[in-house]
Image (cartoon, grey):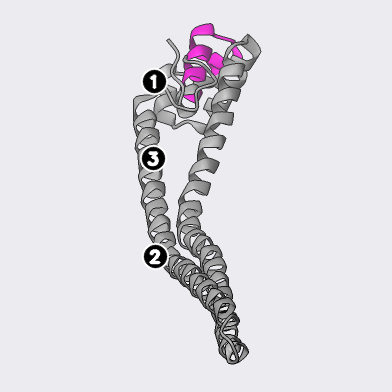
Amino acid sequence: MTSRYLPYATTPARLLAQLVSDVVVVVWTAVWVLVGMAVHAAVSTIAQVGRQVQDGANGVAGNLNSAGDSADNVPLVGDSLSKPLRAASEAALDIAGAGHSLDTTASWLAWVLALAVAAPPILAVVMPWLFVRVRFFRRKWTAITLAATPAGEQLLALRALANRPLAKLAAVSIDPVGAWRRDDAIAVRGLANLELRAAGVTRR
């Protein structure tokens, strides 16, 4: 028997099935992570537009404000020239604020949509896979622990009598129940091995 800490079977067929399921889960998860990243990138372009609008509007507002300050120095008409320039600067600042809001909202929305697209299909596959794997690990742990003691081995043999096919029981002993009652060591070990194999564990 291999280490009880490994979450894999030692029987070839079940081990192959577990490895295949692991590969499928990894590939499935990777595909949907890539899909989520693509959605995030697509929505993030809107946030990039918002940042560009914000930066451009801030630059325009700064230039208009500087022009207004310069217009103040023009004799007689300086005040009349500076007012519309400062008003335009404030309007540009409002546009910059709208660009900032667009950037913030689109950045948040990009993550929400990416998770909304990728998480459900990933969880739909990973959660059942994880449940099956944890259940197998607990069963393997229990079986190996029982097989380490004579009383536990008898219990495994009794479970085999109750759960394994008749043909497999007959292959161990012509009278498997009688052998178990007589505490026939060879038969009990053979029956316990049947239950261990059903749990995905082989014993030399």
Lower position in the chain sequence, tag 2 or tag 1:
2
Which residue corresponds to mark 1? Answer: 171
The span from disc 3 to disc 2 (Cα, nearest Å) is: 31 Å
Do the CB atoms of the residues marked 1 and 3 lie less than 8 Å apart?
Answer: no
Residue 187 % position (x, y): 49, 13
Residue 79 % position (x, y): 62, 88
Do the CB atoms of the residues marked 2 and 1 lie less than 8 Å apart?
Answer: no
Q: Nearer the viewer, mark 2 or mark 1?
A: 2
Which residue corresponds to mark 3? Answer: 21
Quarter of the picture holding the C terminus: top left
**Segment tinted magenta in the rendering:** 178-195
167 relative to 118, above or below: above
In this picture, residue 158 sits left or right of residue 172: right
Residue 142 % position (x, y): 60, 24
Which residue corresponds to mark 2? Answer: 42
Tell me, yes or no, whether the highlighted magenta stretch contains residue 3: no
Q: Nearer the viewer, residue 3 or 52?
A: 52
